[in-house]
Amino acid sequence: MNLFRLGLMAAWLVLAAYTVAVISRHGMGLIPIFFGDIARIGWTGQFNLDFMCFLSLSAFWTAWRGGFAPASLALAVVAFFGGAGFLLPYLLILTLRARGDMRSVLLGPRA
């Protein structure tokens, strides 16, 4: 479990550093580029659409895990727009709260 948690932290740190570098070079104009690539129906658009499916799955799981309560719906929005920047620390927090019980992490309080 500790190796998993270290992996989550390492991935988040790499992602955060990379994101800072991209924003400093290109600004915050992700949305038009992201959907523009999808509209052009090329490989970058295919990747973006595939990634958006993963974002949707992450958001749906986050909402479902919380029983679709208002707080979990708010977290689902953050999951969709935050991607791994949200999911990595969220999973880290869940593993700590659940004391490594992955059934509880994945299924939530109902487990």
Image: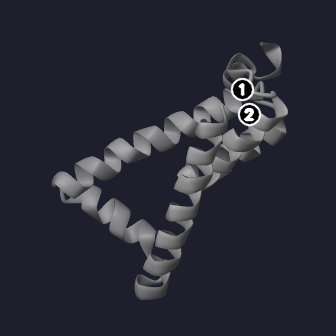
- Checking the image for residue 95, the label placed there is 2
Question: CA gap, disc 1 to disc 2?
Answer: 6 Å
The quadrant in which the C terminus is found is top right
- Helix, strand or loop under label 1: helix
Residue 19 against residue 86 in the figure, above or below: below
Residue at 51% in and 62% down: 15
Residue count near mark 1 (Cα–Cα under 10 Å), binned few <14, some 14–19, many ≥20? many
Q: Do the residues labelled 1 and 2 touch (CB within 8 Å)?
A: yes
Residue at 65% in and 42% down: 5
Return the residue nearer the eye: 24 or 48.
Answer: 24
Residue 73 lies in quadrant: top right
For discs 1 and 2, the disc positioned in front in the rendered view: 2
Residue 14 against residue 26 in the figure, above or below: above
The quadrant in which the N terminus is found is top right
Residue at 70% in and 16% down: 103
Q: Position of residue 71 (x, y in %)?
A: 82, 41
Q: Is residue 64 left or right of residue 22?
A: right
Q: Name the residue under label 1.
A: 105
- Checking the image for residue 7, the label placed there is none
Residue at 35% in and 60% down: 35
Residue 35 against residue 98 in the figure, above or below: below
Residue 71 against residue 104 in the figure, above or below: below
Upstream in sequence: badge 1 or badge 2: 2
Return the residue nearer the eye: 29 or 1.
Answer: 1
Residue 96 makes an appearance in the image: yes
Question: What type is the residue that disc 1 sits on?
Answer: Val
Question: What type is the residue that disc 2 sits on?
Answer: Thr
